[in-house]
Amino acid sequence: MVRKSSQPEIECKRSTHRVAYFDAGLPADLAERLWHEPQSLVALGEPLRANKARHTVLLSWQSQQFVLKHYNEHTWRHALKQCVSPSRAWSTWSTTHRLVAAGVATPRPVACVENRWGVLRRDSFLMYPYVEGQTLRKCLLAEKRQHPTNAEHLWRQLSDLWRRLGQLRVSLADTNAGNFIIGPNGQLWVIDLDKARFHRVALVAAMQRNRGWQQLLRSVKKV
């Protein structure tokens, strides 16, 4: 589950009402569209998940596919909180980049956009490459019936991932089996790292990580 990863070149743009970070390898026209009208790209995408706080779409651009998330501060309490804490897009951007640099297999974000009114952060956007494959839930269902050895290999990858998270003092907020993807080559990827956290105290990290593991087991039992 651990692999080497080079650091990407990141470009930053700022205005009185918007701050954005882009991977330098992002197509120039896509970066411009994200900078000027990110909401229009959400409208172009194929809906994947939506609620009051977050709208997620699959965006096709030229020959590439991306997941684009729009985080909406749907109450004034949530909006005011962003005056003293990072936006959800920025938190996920920075956490995920740290995990990728540490060798965890998760798609590296390529864009982060924050809309602002002065110190008040409004909504924000996060984009990362789409990972081809099947969810862990679907793979376990198929492998349990046909290829038990492959199912064991998936569990070993999960165990390796959890050990690595322990070394990094990281906990994942949502560990249902649908948030893990098995790529065409059998590689396990973890996606949807909203609210993933690095902890200063190892005991707190272990407690939160164990809670996530129990949630994953309950999710797998439903397969």
Image: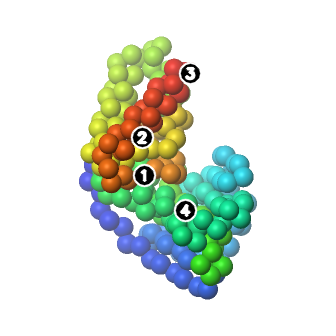
For marks 3 and 4 on the same chain, the one whose residue lies earlier in the sequence: 4
Camera-nearest residue between 30 and 83: 83
Nearest to the eye among marks 2 and 3: give it.
Answer: 2
Q: Identify residue for label 4.
A: 89
Q: Which mark is residue 197?
A: 1
Nearest to the eye among marks 1 and 3: give it.
Answer: 1
Camera-nearest residue between 40 and 161: 161
- Residue 37 figure quarter: bottom right
Name the amino acid, label 3.
Lys
Q: Identify residue for label 2.
A: 208
Q: Residues within 10 Å of mark 3 (few under 14, many from 20)?
A: few
Q: Is residue 190 visible?
A: yes
Name the amino acid, label 2.
Gln
For marks 1 and 2 on the same chain, the one whose residue lies earlier in the sequence: 1
Camera-nearest residue between 47 and 159: 159
- Residue 148 figure quarter: top left
For marks 4 and 1 on the same chain, the one whose residue lies earlier in the sequence: 4
